Image: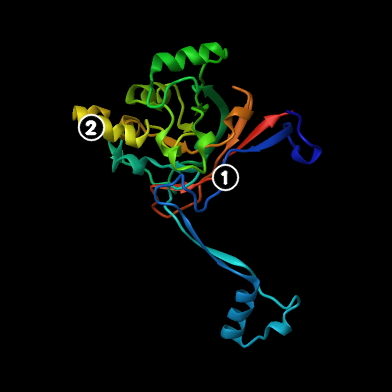
């Protein structure tokens, strides 16, 4: 897909096309606990200033005040980053980092997109499968790579079944990536683990604790971050793009919203 001239940015290293990888933060059936937005109109803004300072609307340059919003949302709603603190109180034998403690260098780097959209919903992504997909695109992981899995679940964004779809990583797959120098792992699904409803169903039938969110709990052994609910991974090349996904600096947060963006060379 060719980019329109206004979609190309010239940086010191060359020209790139930004691709927005984020879903909007707002009410959606795709979130079991959807964000809520209370909006303040321009008229409301003018009335507020009159209440606070006695300034009538007619005195304002445009006869109106400023619009605004108050958002009530989980830090794990929409496209967001999970901090090590989300997984456990400790990581690698030390206090786990909260989102405001994670180095910014973790949130920018070469992006590797692995297409696993051929897998069935609930299928486990293994180290062997990761290595096979890396060989297929001719890439060897290097420290600082950001790996994102395209499960195809994002095509269901805006529908209630979104959070029930997609494949997911297990503990071994997470450790395999982190031990290769990957500190940020992404997915277009609701969770880096297999879908929550699938995990709940298996617990009722097997009672096996090893099946309970193994990708997340692997963060107690290795420090790493996830970025979940990515969008438009299908528009990116397997390698060559750079991702930036700096999270909002939520004080002592277990996660935070991020405007994930891929910079694709043109």
Q: Residue 254: horizontal and vertical position, in percent?
A: 38, 47
Q: Residue at x 43, y 15 (%)?
A: 129
Mark 1 or 2: in front is 2
Q: Quadrant of the C terminus?
A: top right
Residue furthest out toward the right: 5
Residue 50 appears in the picture as rendered = yes
Residue 208 appears in the picture as rendered = no
From the viewer's perspective, is residue 114 above or below residue 156? above
Q: Residue 117: horizontal and vertical position, in percent?
A: 50, 23
Query: Which residue position is annotated with label 2?
Result: 203
- Element type at mark 2: helix
Q: Residue at x 32, y 31 (%)?
A: 218
Query: Which residue position is annotated with label 1?
Result: 259
Q: CA distance from mark 1 to mark 2?
A: 34 Å
Label 1 neighbourhood size at 10 Å, few (<14), some (14-19), many (20+)?
some
Label 2 neighbourhood size at 10 Å, few (<14), some (14-19), many (20+)?
some
For residue 7, side relative to residue 237 (left or right): right
């Amino acid at each position: 897909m060719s980019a329109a001239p206004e979609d190309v940015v010239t940086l010191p290293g060359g020209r790139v096309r930004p691709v927005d990888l984020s879903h909007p933060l707002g009410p959606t059936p795709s979130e079991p606990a959807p964000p809520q937005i209370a909006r303040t109109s321009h008229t409301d803004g003018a009335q507020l200033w009159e209440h606070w300072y006695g300034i009538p609307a007619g005195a304002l340059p445009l006869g109106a005040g400023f619009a605004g919003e108050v958002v009530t949302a989980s830090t794990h709603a929409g496209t967001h980053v999970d901090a090590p603190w989300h997984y456990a109180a400790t990581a690698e034998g030390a206090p786990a980092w909260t989102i405001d403690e994670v180095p910014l260098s973790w949130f920018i780097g070469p992006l590797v997109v692995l297409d696993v959209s051929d897998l069935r919903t609930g299928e486990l992504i293994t180290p062997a499968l990761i290595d096979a997909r890396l060989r297929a695109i001719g890439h060897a992981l290097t420290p600082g790579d950001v790996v994102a899995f395209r499960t195809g679940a994002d095509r269901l964004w805006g529908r209630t079944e979104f959070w029930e779809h997609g494949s997911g990583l297990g503990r071994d797959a997470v450790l395999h990536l982190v031990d290769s120098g990957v500190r940020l792992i992404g997915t277009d699904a609701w969770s880096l683990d297999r879908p929550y409803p699938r995990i709940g169903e298996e617990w009722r039938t097997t009672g096996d604790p090893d099946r309970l969110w193994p990708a997340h709990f692997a963060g107690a052994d290795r420090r790493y971050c996830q970025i979940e609910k990515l969008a438009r991974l299908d528009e990116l090349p397997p390698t060559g793009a750079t991702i930036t996904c700096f999270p909002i600096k939520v004080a002592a947060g277990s996660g935070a919203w991020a405007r994930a963006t891929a910079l694709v060379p043109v």
